[in-house]
Amino acid sequence: MAEPLWFRPKRLGLEMPTKRFIFHRLLQMLVVLIGTVTVLFLVIYLLVPGDAAQVALGSHATPESLANLRHELGLDRPLWVQYGIYLDRLAHFDLGTSYELKRSVSDIILDYLPATLYLTAAALLLETIFGVGWGMLLSLRRSSRLHALSAATSAILLALPAFFLGLLLQYVFAGRLGILPISGMGDWNPLYLILPAVTLAAAQTVIIAGVSKSTLSLELEKPYILAARARGLSRKQALAHHGLRNAFGPVATLLAIDFGTLLGGAMITEIVFAWPGMGRMTYFAARARDVPLIVGAVLVLVVVFVVINTFVDIIYGWLDPRVKAEVGVDG
């Protein structure tokens, strides 16, 4: 027999803030996506010079073919009607046709997006493992030499441009030692992933390590950690069993932001390593002034970034109930 509502006040009190928190995050995601789509529409139809039909058909197109294409694209209609057509096409995953390749932008992006997500996920995994491990090591050990070495290494990794680091890794591990491939993807061979993933993750690993060290050091001073130490646990055991989850909230948020940063910053790494991903594709599209392909790539990357950030915000709320409490009070 189901319990009556009046018999479950505590359970409802826990469920409602969670639902409100998720609703707020999904609403924020929707607002950001609508704003992004609107800005891209204005970029396409108001800020990009020239006639889209002329660019698509070329300089030798006849007036009749230009008029037909303008009518097909809705360019001869009022701006608000064009905006509606644009939204309808997006709802059907129609991002237009590439001027340069004469193919659907959606199909082109689907060809290149998996490689970028593969590289980004590997870089994110590297910075999570080594960044959190680095921060935990610094928070547990108070060696001045270790901290000095960490500071020097951090300064070097943050100062090195991605293209220089990539070329340096290619020279050492591919050119001199010959133990790793120099470029390409190698039919999804993991060996080809190592150098570009390390290049992409290097600077962000330093940032993750710094945030992890700060949050973990604060957790070590909390009463519940001191109580765990009093029960006989070492600093490492107390932090691993009790403090790591509470300290991981800010790190998870930063990792979500890093995901978007890695997606956007993959262009240079992909060019250096001839990686067949979205960044390299967008670079060549920009050189060819292929507006539909550039805008479609930007839109897809923004959508992926916003969705991932929203998902991590929800996970963050689960890790740290104080976040849900704030939404419950404010909402």
Image (spheres, rainbow, N blue to C red):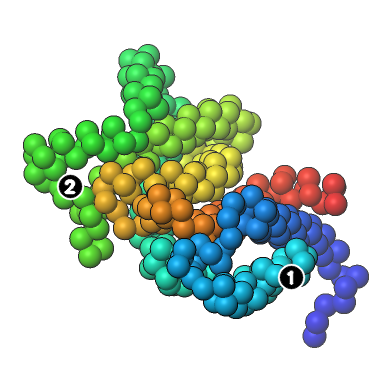
Residue type beneath disc 2: Ile
Query: Residue 169 occupies which quadrant of the picture?
Result: top left
The residue located at (63%, 31%) in the rendering is 223
CA neighbours of label 2 inside 10 A, class few (<14), some (14 to 19), many (20+) = many
Total numbered labels: 2
The Cα–Cα distance between marks 2 and 1, rounded to whole angstroms, is 51 Å
Q: Position of residue 93 (x, y in %)?
A: 57, 73
Residue type beneath disc 1: Arg
Q: Secondary structure at mark 2?
A: loop
The residue located at (47%, 36%) in the rendering is 208
Instruction: In this rendered view, identify the residue nearer to me: 125 or 290.
Output: 290
Q: Is residue 169 above or below residue 60?
A: above
Q: Is residue 27 above or below residue 174?
A: below
Q: Position of residue 285 (x, y in %)?
A: 42, 55
Query: Residue 137 occupies which quadrant of the picture?
Result: top left
Q: Is residue 168 above or below residue 263?
A: above
Q: Is residue 129 visible?
A: no
User: Which residue position holds label 2?
Assistant: 182
The residue located at (51%, 48%) in the rendering is 260
The residue located at (26%, 63%) in the rendering is 188
User: Which residue position holds label 1?
Assistant: 77
Q: Secondary structure at mark 1?
A: loop
Q: Position of residue 254 (x, y in %)?
A: 54, 41
